[in-house]
Image (tube, rainbow, N blue to C red):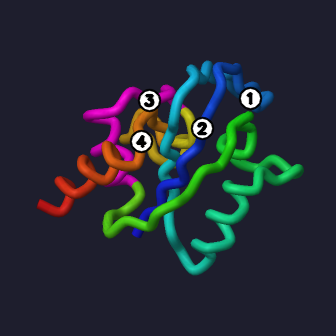
Amino acid sequence: MAYLVFFLCPSHVVDTGAATFKIEEGVYAYVGSCGASCLKRVDRHLRRPAARRWHVDYLNCEGLYAVVVPAEEREAARRLAERCPYVPGFGSTDDPEAPSHLFRCNLAEALYWLDHVRR
């Protein structure tokens, strides 16, 4: 299963030290993998930890909410990439088939497109 964490972002540049990403103002969905620690991961993303580990930790955005969806992380990322604008290379270093794991789309858009994953 996958989770989506939604953020409200101002325009800014994310510099992780290894990569730089341009974020436009808007609502974004970050796709992650739900494992045994799903709740801990989602909580970490929503509260913006001081210790930065993943690309999503570097976002200067307000965490809004999260949902768990009945799709695998990679499948969800590929499906959203077909329909939603995305930030190239963001959060997808371990998923070479997906161009990103951060998408500019709201909850209704994301759930609409993900529903088509199961069909």
Mark 2 vs mark 3, foreground winner is 2
**Picture residue at 82% right of the left edge, 53% below the top:** 49
- Quadrant where the N terminus lies? bottom left
Three-letter code for the amino acid on which mark 4 is drawn: Asn
Q: Which residue is mark 2?
A: 8
Asked if residue 13 lies left or right of residue 6, the reply is right
Callout 4 crowding tier (Cα within 10 Å): few <14, some 14–19, many ≥20: some
Residue 72 location (% of width, % of height): 36, 63
Q: Is residue 26 above or below residue 45?
A: above
Q: Main secondary structure of the magenta part?
A: helix
Decide: marks 2, 3 in contact (CB < 8 A)?
A: no
The label nearer to you, 2 versus 1, is 2
The answer for how far apart the CA atoms under marks 1 and 4 are is 28 Å
Q: Amino acid at mark 1?
A: Ala
Asked if residue 68 is among those painted magenta in the image, a careful observer would answer no
Mark-to-mark CA distance, 1 and 3: 19 Å
Residue 15 position within the rendered picture, expressed as x and y whole percent measured from the top left? 75, 25
Kind of residue indicated by mark 3: Tyr
Residue 97 % position (x, y): 37, 41
Q: Which residue is mark 1?
A: 18
Label 3 sits on residue: 86
Furthest residue in direction right, as rendered:
50
Q: Secondary structure at mark 3?
A: loop
- Label 3 crowding class (10 Å Cα cut-off): few <14, some 14-19, many 20+? many
* Residue designated by label 4: 106
**Mark with earlier residue (1, 4):** 1
Q: Is residue 75 magenta?
A: yes
Q: Earlier in the sequence, mark 1 or mark 3?
A: 1
The residue depicted at 48 percent of the width and 55 percent of the height is 4
- The amino acid pointed to by label 2 is Leu
Q: Could you tell whether 70 is left or right of 103 in the image?
A: left
